[in-house]
Amino acid sequence: MESNLFADSLSTIHGSLFFYLVVMFREKDIAIKCPHCGKEAVFRSAFVFLLKEQKEELERTHKYTGEFLEYENGYIHNKYPERFEYPRDKYNGMAICCECSYNKEHILDWSKDFYYEFSVDETRVWAYNRDQMVALYDYVASKHRDMNKYGHHYDFLYNIPRFMYTKKKREKVLKEMKRNFFSTQ
Ligand SMILES: [Zn+2]
């Protein structure tokens, strides 16, 4: 059984389509395992959806490179038009690693690229970045699980497989997270 932490049911139903939409519309940078050294690197999607106001804001502040393509009620920002073409290369982006200076085109493989990923029993759990994993740890560890406290992590936490915070599994889940991502050494 495979379960995706942030969108258990949706991603199962829609598979990579759903994942793609999330990558494109919501999460711009994703923590991945560096293809070269295996440490934490960043995947920067080449394509990001922007509303008209967001595009105008970028233009005002001159904080962009690349080009905009009209798309439904907004734009797709192609950050690297010299490298990628929408929609042919829609899963592509750049993998950037500060540890080893790797900086190359990368096709995101969501079945194995995630850096913040661990397994509990048969279930695979993954998060986009450290920030999300910290929110998850805190949420699982807390006594009063109030998702409203977690702001923009709400959707992510809402879709956590329920077994993760049952009394029986909770300690095991926290231990796994600690061992993988929050060890002090
Ligand atoms: Zn690296």
Image (cartoon, grey):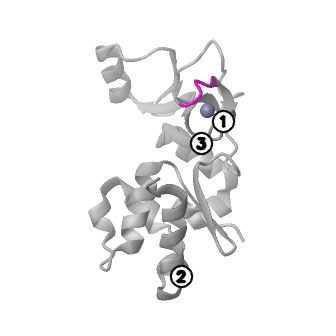
Disc 1 within 8 angstroms of ligand 1 (CB):
yes
Measured Cα–Cα span from mark 3 to mark 2: 26 Å
Relative to 129, is 179 above or below? Answer: below
Most extreme residue toward the bottom is 168
For the residue pair 54 and 46, the one nearer the viewer reads as 46
Relative to 139, is 128 above or below? Answer: above
List x then y, in percent, for residue 119: 63, 66
Q: Residue at the location (52% across, 87% down)? A: 168
- Badge 2 local density, few (<14 within 10 Å), some, or many (20+)? some
Q: Is residue 28 left or right of residue 61?
A: right
Q: Is residue 101 magenta?
A: yes
Relative to 130, is 68 above or below? Answer: above
Q: Give the numbered dot on residue 32.
A: 3
List x then y, in percent, for residue 113: 66, 45
On the rendering, which quadrant does ligand 1 occupy? top right
Q: Is residue 138 left or right of residue 76?
A: left
Most extreme residue toward the front is 185
Amino acid carrying label 2: it is Lys
Q: Give the numbered dot on residue 75.
A: none
The residue identified by callout 1 is 37
Whichever of callouts 3 and 1 sits on the residue coming sooner in the sequence is 3
